[in-house]
Image (cartoon, rainbow, N blue to C red):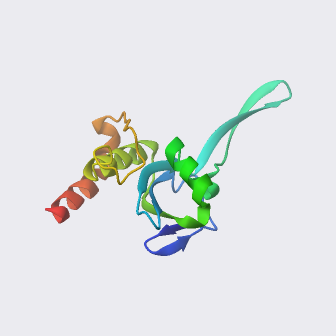
Amino acid sequence: MWFYNGNIYDPDDLDPKDLYGFVYLIEHIKSNKKYIGKKFFWSRKTRQVKGKRKRYITESDWRDYYGSSEKLNEAVDLYGKEEYNRSIIHLCKTKSECAYLEAYEQFTRNVLLSDEYYNDWISVRVTSRHVDKIREMIMEKIDDSC
């Protein structure tokens, strides 16, 4: 299960028009080792209908997801899923918002410089016009941390 603001997160009325995805923190309870990543609620798929390819949107595997890190997934297999807490840090309305906030969290937490994290790399591609809507939110967070 996923937690958001300390509560179990399982939206009954999840709608692709409302939220695109989220940025998350997965933490091993005993060792305190962590992973920061992003996951989308929706995936686009295609199917053949009367000889034509039709695109549709379906819910992704986010409910059972434990990250894309090989190290993390090996540890989850070794210790068991019950040894990990999964928390949503940010709910995002766009793909770019997810990308930016994931990178923001990874850089501000120094995930590549610390043995405390499973993260091995940071990859992001975002333009300033993509983040106009979240600029104020980020600036508030920076001001709060100073």
Residue lying farthest to the left in this orientation: 146
Residue at 19% from the left image edge and 57% from the top image edge: 142
Q: Nearer the viewer, residue 43 or 93?
A: 43
Q: Nearer the viewer, residue 113 or 56?
A: 113
Q: Can residue 141 be seen from the camera position used here?
A: yes
Whether 74 is drawn above or below 5: the answer is above
Viewer can see residue 69: no
Q: Residue furthest bottom?
A: 7
Q: How many marks?
A: 0
Whether residue 77 is situated above or below residue 43 in the rendered picture: below
Quarter of the image with the C terminus is bottom left
User: At which x and y percent is residue 65?
Assistant: 59, 53
Left or right: residue 42 versus residue 19 is right
Residue for point 28% across, 37% down: 128
Snapshot quadrant of residue 103: top left
Left or right of residue 140: residue 112: right
Percent of width and height locating residue 30:
46, 67
**Spot occupied by residue 3 in the image (x, y as percentages of width and height):** 50, 69
Name of the residue lying farthest toward the top: 51
Which residue is more in the foreground, 119 or 75?
75
Q: Is residue 81 left or right of residue 22?
A: right
In the rendered view, would you say 41 is above or below 130?
below
- Quadrant where the N terminus lies? bottom right
Q: Is residue 68 rendered to the left or right of residue 89?
A: right
Q: Residue at x 60, y 54 (%)?
A: 78
Q: Considering only vertical position in the picture, is 4 above or below 69? A: below
Looking at this view, name the residue that lies furthest to the right: 50
Residue at 47% x, 49% y: name it: 38
